[in-house]
Image: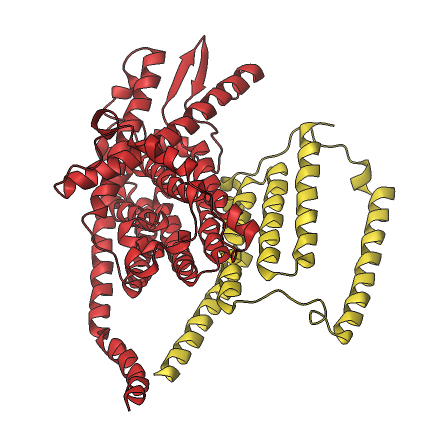
Chain colours: A yellow, B red
């Protein structure tokens, strides 16, 4: 077992444990913190793939910005611990079971396919992980993926303007 | 670094880590001492001067006092997070220093060892990612304390950190565009030996915006609303005692030191100073370059203390207005101007002048718009909203 495999198991394991912890903690703050742990482990997995830029962005955007807002909202609303009964009503429970079974079937299907007869199972691990530099990503964004990139930025801009308009209307009504 | 044999690499890295971490910890003590002495000097008093020569052992006495104090955990706190929070603030402050290049390189036994713990190709992104995590220590410490003053401090601090992080990230993009690298070593190397080549000359408004945002990120005085003593007792660390309180304290000073080191690398030429760093042999040049970097960081840290006793604390709305309406537009302008002028002229002089002129224009426009809006009615509104209840109470 080489260092890369050990690190993969470490990051993958932490990521899984974090993900399970998100749904098993009763307190929303602890759930949010577990989610941050998961994001971190995923950044580690990106690093193993040689995608340094993606790993850094994962930490900056998800762990650094979005989860802070999550915590902020939880703290402001002062949400208490969820009780075991009130957490899930009967209807939701049935829905959850159906979805869970579907997901489990899908997972088993994919796992057997991958392990049996696909290119992934027979592929030899690359001798050296290809490193994607920020330069490469920038070049791709502004040549091959220019249109999707611009469309995404337009959508984000529209969302931004929408938020400002909504907030403005709220504060004017207050006055 | 790639050319080193594995054993040399491991040995040199371990040595660098041990030395740098200890320099950081001693630097914290030195900062605490110099802050108290410089504060005293600025207020025309002496400051602590009893323990050791000129009071230089005072931080050790403070540390011993903290260690021997009772480590109190109040009953009403959320215990796991309460214990975890100081560490979550201290660790990001410690690990950021890993990518800071603190000198050129030093040759020992024929091996050329770069004076930097890890030269990663996303250096500056790593710094931004790790500093953005520092906010968790503050927020969780505040929430876990289960105390309204702590919570208010934590909420203020997180809002402030999120707002100023944007400026922090945008202000360095101009630098990155002209260096075309994210590695801190390459940014430092690209600046050259002479002060008029350093980035703060080319990106002066961005340098000011970055420095201001860094003061806000470290919760230093013009922006220390998170622990405003007159309003919030001590803010997010009100409920902490003994070494846990000391850890919050250490993290603040460590953030200052690392922030200054990053600023020196990004804007103030790193270890360069009029070619002095190339003097002497392969060993001496490494030591001299480290000395230059050390002195620059120390001067920048002195400015931290200086600003503390020069500027009074901002009011909360002033803080938000300043961050979003002044610093952010200035940082954005610097990106646009740097990019456009560099493509058009490829002259650093034109970019430098253009940056200053554009920042001046943008700041004047914002100031004009703010003056036209006149914030006074808003304050009267909040008063009139309060008056009916007050009048009701009297009647």
The quadrant in which residue B183 appears is top left
Residue B21 left/right relative to B208? right
Any part of residue B3 in sight = no
The residue closer to the viewer here, B8 or A162, is B8
Q: At 49% from the left edge and 62% from the top edge, which residue is drawn?
A: A72
The residue closer to the viewer here, A129 or B8, is B8
Q: How many marks?
A: 0
Residue A157 left/right relative to A52? left
Q: Furthest-bottom residue in view?
A: B395
* Quadrant of the frame with the C terminus of chain B: bottom left
Q: Position of residue B277 (x, y in %)?
A: 29, 20
B181, above or below B10, in the image? below
Residue B342 left/right relative to A145? left
Residue B183 left/right relative to B336? right
Any part of residue A15 in sight = yes
Q: Furthest-top residue in view?
A: B109
The residue closer to the viewer here, A157 or B33, is B33
B388, above or below A52, in the image? below
Q: Position of residue B229 (x, y in %)?
A: 30, 55
Q: Position of residue A100 (x, y in %)?
A: 79, 62
């Amino acid at each position: 077992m080489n260092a890369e495999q050990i690190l993969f198991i470490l990051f993958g394991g932490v990521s899984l444990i974090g993900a399970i912890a998100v749904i098993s903690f009763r307190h929303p703050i602890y759930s949010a913190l577990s989610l941050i742990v998961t994001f971190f482990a995923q950044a580690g997995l990106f690093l193993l793939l040689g995608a340094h830029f993606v790993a850094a962005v994962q930490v900056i955007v998800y762990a650094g910005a979005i989860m802070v807002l999550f915590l902020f909202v939880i703290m402001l609303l002062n949400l208490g611990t969820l009780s075991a009964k009130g957490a899930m009503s009967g209807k939701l429970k049935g829905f959850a079971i159906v979805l869970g079974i579907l997901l489990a079937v899908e997972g088993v299907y994919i796992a057997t396919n991958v392990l049996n007869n696909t290119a992934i199972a027979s592929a030899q691990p690359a001798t050296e992980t290809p490193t994607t530099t920020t330069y490469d990503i920038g070049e791709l964004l502004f040549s091959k993926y220019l249109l999707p990139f611009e469309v995404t930025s337009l959508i984000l801009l529209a969302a931004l303007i929408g938020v400002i308009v909504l907030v403005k209307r709220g504060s004017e009504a207050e006055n | 670094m790639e050319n080193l044999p594995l054993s040399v690499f491991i040995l040199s890295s371990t040595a660098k880590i041990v030395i740098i971490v200890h320099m950081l910890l001693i630097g914290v003590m030195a900062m605490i001492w110099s802050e108290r002495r410089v504060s005293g000097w600025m207020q025309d008093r002496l400051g602590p001067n009893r323990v050791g020569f000129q009071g230089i052992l005072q931080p050790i006495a403070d540390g011993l006092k903290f260690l021997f104090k009772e480590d109190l955990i109040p009953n009403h706190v959320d215990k796991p997070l309460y214990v975890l929070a100081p560490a979550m603030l201290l660790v990001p402050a410690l690990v950021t220093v890993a990518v800071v290049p603190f000198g050129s390189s030093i040759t020992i036994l024929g091996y050329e060892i770069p004076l930097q713990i890890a030269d990663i190709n996303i250096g500056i992104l790593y710094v931004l990612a790790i500093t953005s995590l520092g906010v968790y220590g503050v927020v969780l410490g505040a929430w876990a304390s289960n105390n309204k003053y702590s919570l208010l401090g934590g909420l203020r601090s997180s809002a402030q950190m999120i707002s100023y992080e944007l400026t922090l990230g945008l202000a360095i993009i101009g630098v990155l565009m002209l260096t075309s690298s994210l590695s801190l070593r390459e940014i430092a190397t690209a600046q050259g030996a002479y002060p008029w080549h350093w980035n703060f000359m080319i990106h002066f408004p961005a340098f000011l915006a970055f420095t201001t945002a860094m003061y806000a990120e470290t919760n230093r005085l013009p922006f220390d609303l998170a622990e405003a003593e007159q309003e919030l007792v001590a803010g997010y660390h009100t409920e902490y005692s003994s070494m846990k309180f000391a850890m919050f304290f250490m993290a603040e000073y460590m953030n200052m030191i690392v922030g200054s080191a990053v600023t020196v690398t990004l804007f103030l030429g790193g270890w360069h100073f009029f070619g002095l760093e190339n003097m002497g042999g392969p060993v001496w040049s490494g030591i001299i370059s480290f000395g230059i970097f050390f002195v620059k960081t120390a001067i920048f840290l002195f400015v931290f203390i200086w600003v503390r006793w020069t500027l009074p604390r901002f009011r909360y709305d002033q803080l938000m207005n300043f961050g979003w309406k002044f610093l952010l537009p200035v940082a954005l302008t610097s990106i646009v101007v740097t990019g456009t002028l560099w493509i058009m002229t490829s002259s650093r002089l034109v970019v430098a002048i253009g940056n200053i002129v554009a920042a001046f224009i943008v700041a004047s426009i914002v100031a004009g718009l703010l003056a036209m809006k006149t914030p006074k009615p808003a304050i009267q509104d909040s008063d009139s909203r309060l008056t009916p209840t007050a009048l009701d109470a009297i009647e």
